Image: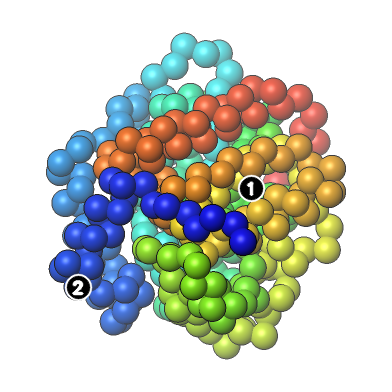
Amino acid sequence: MPAVPQLDPQLAAVVAALRARCAPPPFSGTPDEARGRMRAAVLAARERSGLPDVQSAEDTVAAHADVRVPVRVYRPHSHRPSLPTVVFFHGGGFVLGSVELMDDIARKLCRDIEAVVVSVDYRLAPEHPFPAAHDDALAATLWALANAVALGGDPAYVAVAGESAGGNLAASSAIQVRDRGFALAGQLLIVPGVDFARDTVRLERNDGCAYPMLTPHDLREVARLYLGTAADRATDFPPSPLHCADLGDLPATVIAVAGCDPLYNEGLAYAARLQAAGIATQVLRYEDMFHPFFGFFEVSEAARRANDEICSCFAATLRACPDDTKEAEV
């Protein structure tokens, strides 16, 4: 039997503090109540640590066909003549989170990757169930591809990135734009949830592992709130990239997984399928991290090192990408 992952001590202190306050599960109560708790926690942390510095941050609208999606465009301090553009999808189980609340994560991506970052404020469930978030993600990616030069980036180097639910949206968008004849420069999938048909009962029985910050019960709530009446679509693509029949011709991929996360094996399974399809795939394993570690770089030294490594690896992936984009009408 593999060793039980031991949580990083600084992240363990966060979990202990939440338990001492009897903090409710992330998706408990009404969606508005859950969003209010998340907002209060994020803003309190931000007051203590500030925000990573970038050259500019501008709110605009990504419009494609009949879909209009609010986005925030970040530009780095950089003297490079050609910058990649990264379309970023935040986490939050398709129910929580926003561009504003993930401002620090997007800024750090922009600074550390040296890329124009388009952070997408996709519609949230349950008010906007599947396929709303997927439709918004695809529209924003197509808009970025069509407007890379105007955004300050190089049209040959447009990539997608996402955390958790956002990892699903990034992976889904990469597949869908491939099917439209485009070649992205890369995809970064951080603790991605790529299988709505996951066996949460089996995860609960895996009592050798603790899953702080995201439990199997939370995953059931995510599926219930986002899929709604489309629950029978769990094994389809979309919404489940792991069940897509063809993963060929996708961009070079970096996948980061956390040892104390119920999505750990799901991320590894997706990486294995990409590798089997001939896709250059780098897997970064952080055995002592919990699910949302990517945003905890001001709390945990180990989480900061992990975040730094992920950004460095993805920056290297984008620099190595050949200029082989295909012409297609967006």
Q: Is residue 134 left or right of residue 250?
A: left
Q: Position of residue 64 (x, y in %)?
A: 60, 53
In this view, 35 is above or below 81? below
Q: Is residue 237 visible?
A: yes
The CA distance from mark 1 to mark 2 is 43 Å
Q: Residues within 10 Å of mark 2 (few under 14, many from 20)?
A: few
Q: Residues within 10 Å of mark 1 (few under 14, many from 20)?
A: many
In this view, 289 is above or below 4? above
Q: Residue at x 61, y 61 (%)?
A: 1
Q: Position of residue 259 (x, y in %)?
A: 51, 53
Residue nearer the viewer, 256 or 201: 201
Q: Is residue 137 visible?
A: no
Which amino acid type corresponds to the residue marked 2 in the rendered image?
A: Cys
In this view, 118 is above or below 85? below
Identify the secondary structure beneath mark 1: helix
Identify the secondary structure beneath mark 2: loop
Residue 142: mark in rendering: 1
Which amino acid type corresponds to the residue marked 1 in the rendered image?
A: Leu
Determine which quarter of the picture holds residue 294: top left
Q: Residue at x 45, y 78 (%)?
A: 217
Residue nearer the viewer, 21 or 326: 21
Residue that badge 2 annotates: 22
Q: Position of residue 154 (x, y in %)?
A: 61, 26
